[in-house]
């Protein structure tokens, strides 16, 4: 029989000896810190490996983000430049439209002034000849009568009355006109007498001058009527018969 002490030693070191575990005791805060550090380390390694994998694989996310930021900045700059150019274009278009309108107005004024200048030259030449002839022709004459159609059923007339010789006083009187009309659709009058048929024309037909006077006015005709001729007579105040008469045939 073996000694009891020897049997205890055998049980302690033999195969059948009970297992023994060695454990290090750590508090929960330190465990949390350790776990967090490990997680951060693993995440950092993963991110570092992800970035380098993108670089090595031909895709650099940071470079792409930088390019996108640059592209956005360029896009904003170009958008602002486009807005500025649109505003400038609108301003230029407005100025151009104003310039065109001004040019058209000036062209119209130049044409009117040119026409008026031509008429004045003609009038001047006519009056110079008239003055030269007036010394030889004594009395009142009507050297010029003109008629042209205006707007609607209105006709415009111009008459020049001249007094020759060497008058010492003014001529006082009036004009009387007879407008002969063509046929009208509603059977209107065949002639119109001024100022009898249109009293409002009377003031324009008054005469008071020493050497000459221009008389201008309008004649209203029935709708659709045509003016065929115009006879103008100059009367002196207090005298029943005309001093001079002239007829203008239009057709």
Image (spheres, helix red, strand yellow):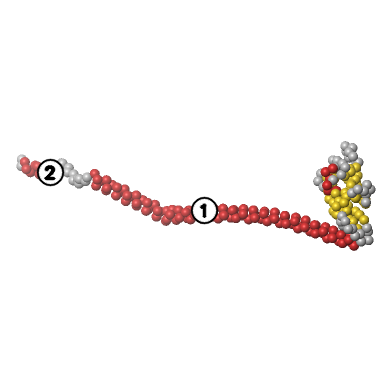
Q: Secondary structure at mark 2?
A: helix
On the question of residue 27 being in view, the answer is: yes
Say which of 152 and 64 sits in front.
152
Q: Position of residue 79 (x, y in %)?
A: 54, 53
For the point 83% across and 47% down, the residue is 203
Say which of 130 and 90 sits in front.
130
Mark 1 / mark 2, whichever is N-terminal = 2
* Spatial separation of the CA atoms under disc 1 and disc 2: 84 Å
Q: Is residue 157 left or right of residue 46?
A: right
Total tally of numbered discs in the picture: 2
Q: Secondary structure at mark 1?
A: helix
Q: Is residue 1 left or right of residue 104?
A: left
Task: In the displayed orientation, state which residue is furthest to the top.
Answer: 186
- What residue would you read off at disc 2? 12
Say which of 56 and 40 sits in front.
40
- What residue would you read off at disc 1? 76
């Amino acid at each position: 029989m073996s000694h009891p002490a020897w049997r205890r030693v055998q049980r302690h070191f033999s195969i059948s000896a009970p297992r023994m575990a060695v454990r290090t005791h750590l508090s929960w805060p330190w465990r949390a810190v350790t776990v967090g550090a490990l997680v951060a380390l693993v995440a950092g390694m993963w991110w570092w490996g992800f970035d380098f994998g993108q670089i090595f694989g031909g895709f650099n996310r940071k470079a792409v983000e930088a390019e996108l930021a640059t592209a956005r900045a360029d896009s904003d700059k170009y958008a602002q430049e486009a807005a500025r150019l649109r505003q400038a274009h609108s301003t230029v278009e407005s100025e151009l439209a104003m310039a065109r309108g001004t040019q058209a107005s000036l062209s119209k004024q130049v044409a009117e002034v040119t026409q008026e200048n031509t008429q004045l030259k003609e009038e001047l030449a006519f009056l110079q000849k008239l003055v030269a002839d007036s010394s030889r022709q004594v009395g009142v004459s009507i050297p010029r009568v003109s008629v042209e159609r205006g707007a609607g059923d209105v006709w415009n007339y111009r008459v020049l009355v001249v007094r020759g010789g060497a008058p010492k006083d003014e001529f006082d009187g009036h004009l009387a006109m007879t407008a002969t009309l063509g046929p009208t659709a509603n059977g209107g009058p065949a002639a119109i007498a001024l100022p009898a048929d249109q009293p409002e024309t009377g003031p324009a037909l008054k005469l008071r001058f020493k050497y000459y006077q221009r008389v201008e006015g309008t004649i209203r005709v029935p709708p659709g009527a045509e003016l065929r001729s115009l006879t103008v007579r100059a009367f002196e105040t207090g005298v029943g018969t005309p001093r001079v008469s002239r007829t203008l045939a239009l057709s």
